[in-house]
Structure formats: structure tokens, C-alpha cells
Image (cartoon, grey):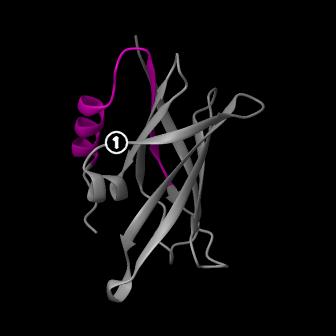
Amino acid sequence: MKTLSLAAITFLALSSAATAGQTIYDCKLKNNQKRYGWIPERMVLFVDDQKRNAEVIDDYINYYHKEPIPASIENLRNGRFRVQWKMDSMSVRAGTDVSATFRVSVSEKTGNAQMRVRIDGVADNRPSGQGPCKISKRK
């Protein structure tokens, strides 16, 4: 899969999804397990300040959907929130398709993000990663 350039993902994400009253989390993630490759290098979250709805885009979403997709959002303790989305029919080796659930928890204060991926049908494959997010607001 081609990696989307930082400039291209920023342009696509900000022009197509960002609206007034949103907080934007532009995250650079580091994969904890190099061999798995399920953690995107970059992810942008759009969190609606009023409704607490979320949209997300990363390299995988851009490849399959070409624009941000809706994600569920849940408030956690200590100023953190969790965003979750599912990608279905992702092509892997030899024409096999899999589904994967992506979960990201973010600290609203520090912007630190932690991602975990659960790949359906694979018992012991739990890719994870973390990294900082640049936080900006749209008024």
C-alpha cells in the first residue's frame, strides 16, 4: 500500500472533514511491533466539540474510502477519550480479505495517543503503537 504524504493527508483531511466547533488531532504513530504493519504512521481525528462525534482518516482509510469515515467516541477517565472504527474487507496476502477494529485512546491535555488493532480471526495478533498528536481547534 502506498503511504500518503503528510501534505496530501493534511490537505484531504482538513478540506473534507474539518468544520467549525471541532478539535483536530493530527497524530504521528510509532508501531510497537515492526513485523505487523497495521499501525498507520499518521492518523487525523476530527472530534465535534458539541456532539462528541468523531471522524478519522489514515493511510488505510484513504486507500479504501478516499475520505474520513465516522468513528464512535467514548469519554474515559482522567481527560482521555477513545475512538473506535472498523475496516471490513481489507485485502492482505493471496487475495484474502480481513476485517480489523482500530481503537485509539487520546489524552486531551497532552495529545498522546495509543492505538490497538484487533484483526478478526487472528487470535494472537494484537498490533499496537503510540505517539504524539498535534491539537488544533476550529472555532
Picture coordinates of residue 102, whole percent (x, y): 54, 56
Query: Seen from this angle, which residue lies furthest top?
Result: 139
Picture coordinates of residue 81, whole percent (x, y): 65, 35
Pick the residue in front: 91 or 130: 91
Q: Please check the rendered image and state whether residue 16 is part of the magenta-colored stretch, yes or no.
A: yes
User: Image height check: is 102 above or below 97?
Assistant: above
Picture coordinates of residue 16, whole percent (x, y): 25, 32
Q: Quadrant of the N terminus?
A: bottom left
The residue at the point 55 percent across, 40 percent down is 72
Secondary structure state at the residue bearing disc 1 = loop
Disc 1 marks a residue whose amino acid type is Pro
- Residue 54 horizontal side relative to residue 81, left or right: left
Query: Seen from this angle, which residue lies furthest right?
Result: 77
User: Image height check: is 137 above or below 47?
Assistant: above
Query: Seen from this angle, which residue lies furthest bottom?
Result: 94
Pick the residue in front: 14 or 88: 88
| Magenta region, residue range | 6-29
- Residue 122 horizontal side relative to residue 54, left or right: right
The residue at the point 59 percent across, 51 percent down is 103
Residue at mark 1: 68
User: Image height check: is 93 above or below 111?
Assistant: below
Figure disc tally: 1
User: Image height check: is 124 above or below 81?
Assistant: below
Q: Quadrant of the C terminus?
A: top left
Picture coordinates of residue 77, whole percent (x, y): 78, 32
**Image quarter of residue 9:** top left
Q: Please check the rendered image and state whether residue 42 is part of the magenta-colored stretch, yes or no.
A: no
The residue at the point 34 percent across, 42 percent down is 68
The residue at the point 57 percent across, 58 percent down is 129
Q: Residues within 10 Å of mark 1 (few under 14, many from 20)?
A: many
- Residue 9 horizontal side relative to residue 93, left or right: left
